[in-house]
Amino acid sequence: MGRCGRGSITLRCVAMAGIGATACNQIFALVDVNNFYVSCERVFNPALENQPVVVLSNNDGCAVARSNQVKALGIKMGTPWFKFKDLAKEHNIIVLSSNYTLYGDMSDRVMTILRGYSPNVEIYSIDESFLSLNGMSSLWPATVDMGQSIRYRVRKWTGLPVCVGIGPSKTLAKLANHLAKTRPEMEGVCDLVSMPQAELDAYLSTTEVGEVWGVGRRIGAHLDAAGIKTAKALRDAPLSWLRAKFGVVMERTGNELRGTSCLALEEIAAPRKQIVSSRSFGQLVHTLAVLSESVTSYMTSAAEKLRRQRSVCEAVQVFIATNPFREQDAQYSNSITVPLPNPSCDTRLLVRAALFGLKKIYRPGLAYKKAGVMLTGIGDAAVIQRSLLVQHGVGEKSEKLMEVMDALNRRFGRNTIAIASAGTNRAWRMRRECMSPCYTTSWNDVPIVHAR
Amino acid sequence: MPTIIPFIPRSTSTALPRLQPAATAPVVFRLPLLQHRISAGFPSPADEYIEKSLDLNTYLVRNKTATFFFRVIGDSMTGANIHDGDMLVVDRSIEPKHRHIVLAVINNEYTVKRLYHQDGVIELHAENAAYPPIRFGEHDELQVWGVVVGAVSRFAV
């Protein structure tokens, strides 16, 4: 078990008093899957174990997940594929396209396990969740034991390795997770709540300020210039000074580091105020016809998201762009916002508006790399203002049609029915040359087991 | 309310605490348990007795979160009624024991075999005389991926 746990009750309270007087009622855990995408691939392909593996972003653009072996070679997150192609060959790095269907399913499994540990879970990203551990002390007298149990169960049930960070605020839980991941002596679990003050100070003073949650690269540089180089220095900086110099957000971070929880668990994601659907094309696109197909397809998925959160939008924005990295090509990018006659979530109306906008901004003779749509003026579908004028894409008929369309696409797979202008050719689709099978979501892709 | 079971430290036992998984609602094909005509005028006397329909998931899957499917290639397990082309239901949350049918990783491949684990001897047995058992020495490591809890066949019709 971790060395920082097993503290007696008295020790815990001493540590709590040290960390902040008002902190006694909050405990958060951050559970994070190590090298998530790579780990998912390894669960179903044992040949990847102990090998250097990289997962590339959409269109095989850049590195979005790296195994430890690849990290050790110095390939950074976000490095473009063409920049480490040679290095990959030299070190036999296994390169995979991202398989978000697989990652999504594995993520759901992890989150389901975590909900067995706490009734209050915030899914922070595809591979990270915050848990509230308030009131758990009778079930788990030593929080580290709970952390180890989570680690063991997620690994056993899903095959994925996780680290657990525990702290009296979300910022400290996140920092604890970083320590759990980078210090082998922690055995994957770090509990800052029960850690003695001296030990805590020692860890914080060896943690760079840039590792603190909410400190970006730019603010990190400013802090560094102001003499604040470590997490400990940031914690001990006067709050009023932080506020005056860096604003209220940094003051909050200072409070969080002192153990005063300022950020609550967000269990229910607020409906999004903006929905974007855009992507780079697998190959350059020249004609309005092909651009129209892609814009229709993006709008279809954006409208689906809009309906899923039971919203309507007031306007749609379309944008197109050439490839800025191809300096030999003529460059152009433009966007246009098309207001709707009335708020709606009807795919047909939204696509019509988007294609209308696309025609306005399209210039022939150029090589386009990217297109996308954005929905704005998003509001609740239940509070649409009725009008005396003729309404488009609202009402019972539209609602029913969209409901049936969504249900069919959910049941029989994406694009079972779509707007005809989405086309069927899709030469512009994403490039995913080395994608693994959808092991857990498609009967045709389930892994093979040999009986021999 | 989720059920939380205390954690048993690894040093004393590797057994997992038995946790009742949260109810899940997979999209399934429903087979009505009772079929009856709709009578005009009089309600069916069976209406009161209709219970929930049967779902093969509840029969085959104990722990959805830890369950994965694999397709079988080969005939080494025919004695255990596992045939070429069958779909295996594999549960990772079950602790492998002597006589369990397990999915093991051998030479970077998934293999299905019966686990023989008694008196300090660990072996993987086929259920077909044509295939010899695989023995594990003192320093070998057997990697069990999961325990096979069911097999499903589909017949051509």
Image (cartoon, grey):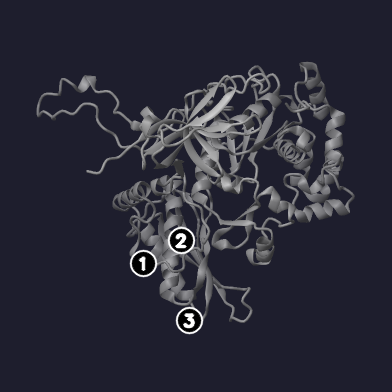
* A128, above or below A426, in the image: above
Q: Residue at x 46, y 56 (%)?
A: A302
Q: Residue tagged by mark 3?
A: A364
Residue A338 coordinates in the image, percent (x, y): 46, 66
Q: Mark 3 lies on which chain?
A: A
- Are discs 1 and 3 located on one and the same chain? yes
* Mark 1: amino acid: Ser
Query: Which quarter of the figure has residue A239?
Result: top right
Q: Which residue is drawn at 58% across and 48% down?
A: A47
The quarter of the picture where the C terminus of chain A appears is: top left
Q: Which amino acid does label 3 sit on?
A: Pro
Return the residue at label 2. Answer: A298
Front residue of B67/A336: it is B67
A89 or A400, which lies in front?
A: A89
Task: Provide the secondary structure element on which disc 3 rests.
Answer: loop
Q: Where is residue A386 in the image (x, y as percent from the top left)?
A: 37, 52
Proximity of marks 1 and 3: CB atoms separated by less than 8 Å: no
Q: Does residue A305 appear to the left or right of B4 in the view shown?
A: left
Label 2 chain ID: A
Q: Quick one: label 1 or label 3, which is nearer the N terminus?
A: 3
The answer, for residue A378, to whether it is visible in the render is: yes
Query: Residue A421 got which mark?
Result: 1
